[in-house]
Image (cartoon, helix red, strand yellow):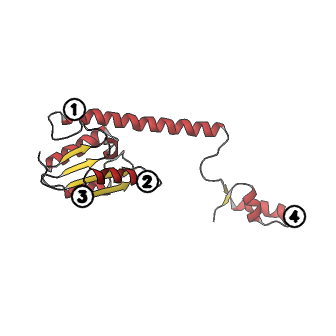
């Protein structure tokens, strides 16, 4: 497929706290004229910027991604996205995996292998996260919101504190709980 159309980029990170700067610099250096970017999980294909990219594709366009796992972490979704790009007449290239070029004869085979690799990496990330949480819990770190101090408990704490001239709110704060209002 010869490129007579636009060169698009697609950049994605999983969380709002993560930075897209490195991916954007790579895509700009690769010649992307327009980059669709988002901060959302790659475990689903239901992503607003990905949908806008797909709707913009015309024959001769090329989509460049920093790595295959930026496009999808699910093998089936990856193959469907790539198929839909090909149906639109657009090509797909990954900077981190130069073998990924959907204009070649082995495109589906390569996509399937890379999709499996992305899914395995997602599983490894989940395992590392779970291991880190378990280690933290073993060290006494508490996760989640503080328990709620019910109105009844607030009244009981207030009765006991009246003699000590403390407010219920100050006592609640020392108890590591929150008042549900």
Task: Give whichever of 103, 14 is nearer the camera.
Answer: 103
Work out which residue is located at the far front of the displayed protein and give it. Answer: 29
Q: Name the residue carrying label 1.
A: 109
Circle nearer the viewer, 4 or 1 = 1
Point 84% across, 66% down: residue: 162
Are discs 2 and 4 less than 8 Å apart at CB? no
Circle nearer the viewer, 2 or 3 = 3
Point 20% across, 58% down: residue: 56
Instruction: Report helix, strand or loop for mark 2.
Output: loop
Circle nearer the viewer, 2 or 1 = 2
Q: Name the residue carrying label 3.
A: 33
Instruction: Report helix, strand or loop for mark 1.
Output: helix
Q: CA distance from mark 2 to mark 1?
A: 31 Å
Q: Name the residue carrying label 4.
A: 164
Residue 58: give x, y in percent of width and height. Answer: 14, 55
Are discs 3 and 4 less than 8 Å apart at CB? no
Left or right, 2 with respect to 13, comes to: left
Residue 177: give x, y in percent of width and height. Answer: 69, 56
In the image, which disc is placed on residue 149?
A: none
Q: CA distance from mark 2 to mark 3?
A: 20 Å
Mark nearer the N terminus (2 vs 3): 2
Task: Give whichever of 61, 50 is nearer the camera.
Answer: 61
Are discs 2 and 3 less than 8 Å apart at CB? no
Q: Name the residue carrying label 2.
A: 19
Circle nearer the viewer, 2 or 4 = 2
Q: CA distance from mark 2 to mark 4?
A: 50 Å
Q: CA distance from mark 3 to mark 4?
A: 68 Å
Mark nearer the N terminus (1 vs 3): 3
Instruction: Report helix, strand or loop for mark 3.
Output: loop
Q: Residues within 10 Å of mark 2 (few under 14, many from 20)?
A: few
Residue 106: give x, y in percent of width and height. Answer: 17, 33
User: In this orientation, does residue 20 appear?
Assistant: no
């Amino acid at each position: 497929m010869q490129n007579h159309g636009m060169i698009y980029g697609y950049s994605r990170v999983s969380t709002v706290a993560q930075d897209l700067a490195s991916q954007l610099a790579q895509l700009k250096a690769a010649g992307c004229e327009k980059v669709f970017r988002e901060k959302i999980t790659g475990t689903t294909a239901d992503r607003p910027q990905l949908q806008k990219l797909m709707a913009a594709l015309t024959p001769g366009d090329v989509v460049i991604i920093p790595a295959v796992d930026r496009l999808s972490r699910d093998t089936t979704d990856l193959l469907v996205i790539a198929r839909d790009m090909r149906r639109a007449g657009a090509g797909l290239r990954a900077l981190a995996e130069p073998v990924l070029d959907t204009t070649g004869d082995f495109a589906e085979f390569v996509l399937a292998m890379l999709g499996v690799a992305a899914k395995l990496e997602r599983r490894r990330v989940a395992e590392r996260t779970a291991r880190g949480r378990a280690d933290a819990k073993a060290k006494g770190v508490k996760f989640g919101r503080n328990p709620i101090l019910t109105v009844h408990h607030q009244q009981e704490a207030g009765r006991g504190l009246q003699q000590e001239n403390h407010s219920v709110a100050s006592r609640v704060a020392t108890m590591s709980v929150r008042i549900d209002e």
